[in-house]
Each structure stands twice: as structure tokens, then as C-alpha cells.
Image (cartoon, grey):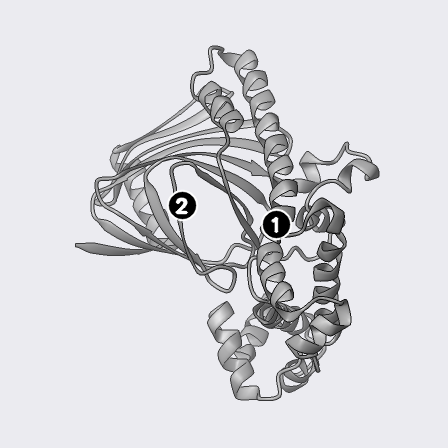
Amino acid sequence: MTKTLTNTDWQELWAESEQKGTVSIQSNGVETIHQGKILDVCNTYKCWTELRSGLFLLIHEDKFIDDLVWIRDSLDNSEFGLSFFLSGKVRIERHGLTDETDESVGKYYSQCNCDIKETEWWKADEKYSRIYLKIEPQEFFSNFIEEELEQIPIFLRQALIGSKVQPYYHQGKITGQMRRVLHQILQCPHQGLMKRMYLESRAVELITLHFQQFQEQKVHDCSLTAKNLSDIDKIYQAKEILLRNLENPPSLMELARQVGLNDFKLKRGFRQVFGTSAFKYLHDYRLEKARQLLVSGEMKVEEVAFRVGFDSRSYFALAFRKKFGLNPNQYFQHRQKSV
């Protein structure tokens, strides 16, 4: 038997489970633990710890009663997360960002999933556990100087300067060093303040190891050697050209010519750096730009569609509804009522 669950369903089941006492909540000032059974869905254990301003740790275990398809609505935030898989496997599609990906033991991912809808497939009777680090960039990096911030991934720098953060996903392998730190987190020998300080130091070490691996993989995955780093700049240049020409973007061949890459290297490099194809990236950016223009209320729907490069109003409406759940007119009216 396979069940289908939405975020609303989950929140209602969680509240009902708390009310009936099948899930308990304990807090000691350092960590908050939720443990028990979500009615007809899973056995669960969640331990949340705020380590410092902008940095949180979650130790998370679930075991589902039935096969489950979980549909998660888009999240309107710019949080960044690192998720390390310790047991079990889940298949996830981040609509408009990635195809279906398997997330399992020995892997971890980093992501910013703002405005992304997810569909997740879970198997029954399989213990799923992970350690998750949640980072709020503007808080976490508030004391870093500009030269230091230049060393962090570009999507995090976007969050720091207050510009629109593009959805992002990157999967990596858990290294031996990471595995050692994860084990130390699970076997923390301290309590109270000492525990918080110990876990914070281990979490920062994991973030450091991720940034190191990210920089190395960004080069190797794109087949860009150390002596050829300019190719990365060309891929970012290609992205900027696309975004400057929403109404009339160049073809892939023309884009490759403009940045000085062959089309094969541009296609492969763009997917490795941004997690999707060049024109899927452009498509999603157009829709996000359209959403922002509709929120401003300064343009009619037809004008918005033309401004972001859609020649067909019907196709624009279809694409917009697929991404945001409402057609452009409905979204415009809904936003105007909420203002």
C-alpha cells in the first residue's frame, strides 16, 4: 500500500499525534526532542539544537509504516542546508531544479530550496536517519570580512547581499573526515553548555569540509583543471548573458560562441555548476521574474509575459500555474488582496 501525503496533511497528523500523546516533546534549554509515532505514518525521532545565531543541528530518524509519496509545497525562504545520510534511502525530485535523485548512505547534499516544490518517495520498514545542518546565511556569516566571503559559494553570497537567491542543489560523498565528525556528533560526551559548544565546533568543521569539497568538485566535475579555471568564469558569464536577454536569448551555439566554449562543454559545465540545463535555468528565472513583477502590481499580465520573454500568453499561463499553483491572473488578484 502506498500513501500520498502533503505538507498540510503532515502538519495535521503531527498536531493530532501530539494531542493524543503518541508524540512526546522534551526540552532542556539546549535541545528539543520530538519522539514517538505519527499516526498511521511513521515512528519518528527529531533532536533540534540551536548552536549559535544562524546555525542549527537536527538529528533525525524515521521509519515509515507504508510506502509513502510526500509532496512538499515550495518554501519561500533563503535557508541553506547540509544533509548527511546515515541510513536508508529516499528518492526526491526537486521540480524545476533536479531530476529524481537517490539520497542514501555515504552521500550528503547541500541545497537552497526556496520556491521549490519537492516530491519524495519513501519505502516502508526502512530506517532512515540523517544529520542536518541548517544555516541562515545573513546571521551565520555576519562577522566575516569581505575577502573571506569571496571564498564561499556564489549562491550563499547572493543571500548575504540581499539579492534573489537562485534555488540550488549539490550532492557529494561523505569523506572519511566527515564520517569521523558525524560519529563525534552522535557520541557527544558532554551535557548542557559544553554540549552546545562541542556540537557547534563539529558543525563548523563539517561546513568547512563541505566548502573544501565543493571547491574541489566544482573544478573536477566540470573537467576544469587548476590551470583552466577561466572556464568556470565563462559558464557564469553565459548565465549572465541569458539573464540580460530574457526577451530574445541567444541559441546554445551562439551562447557558446560568445563565451568562448564549445557547446558540449557549455552544456555539461552549466549543468554541473547550476544543477540544470542552461535553458531550464532561464525558464525558471523568467517565471520567478514574472512573479516579482506581478507582486509589484505595476504591469498587466500580458505586459509581464512579454517583459520576461513569453510570446504566447497561454503558454506563459500554463508554465506559471505549473510552477506556482495559480495562473497569473489568480496570483495577481491574490497578492493584491493580501496587500
Quadrant in the picture for residue 23: top left
Q: Quadrant of the C terminus?
A: bottom right
Residue 287, given in percent of the width and then of the height, sits at 60, 72
Q: Is residue 119 visible?
A: yes
Q: Quadrant of the N terminus?
A: bottom left
Mark 1 neighbour density, 10 Å: few (under 14) some (14–19) many (20 or more): many
- The residue under the point 64% across, 70% down is 263
- The residue under the point 34% across, 49% down is 10
Question: Which numbered tag is attached to residue 21?
Answer: none
**What distance separates the C-alpha of mark 1 from that of mark 2?**
22 Å
- The residue under the point 71% across, 70% down is 243
What secondary structure is marked by label 2?
strand
- The residue under the point 55% across, 71% down is 334
Q: Which residue is mark 1?
A: 78
Residue 165, given in percent of the width and then of the height, sits at 65, 55
Q: Is residue 339 visible?
A: no
* In the foreground, 202 or 32: 202
* In the foreground, 128 or 51: 128
Quadrant in the picture for residue 278: bottom right
The three-letter code of the residue at mark 2 reads: Glu
Image-based side of 163 in relation to 123, left or right: right
Instruction: Report the label total.
Output: 2
Image-based side of 297 in relation to 125, left or right: right
Residue 302, given in percent of the width and then of the height, sits at 63, 86
What secondary structure is marked by label 1?
loop
Residue 108, given in percent of the width and then of the height, sits at 48, 40
Q: Which residue is mark 2?
A: 103
Mark 2 neighbour density, 10 Å: few (under 14) some (14–19) many (20 or more): some
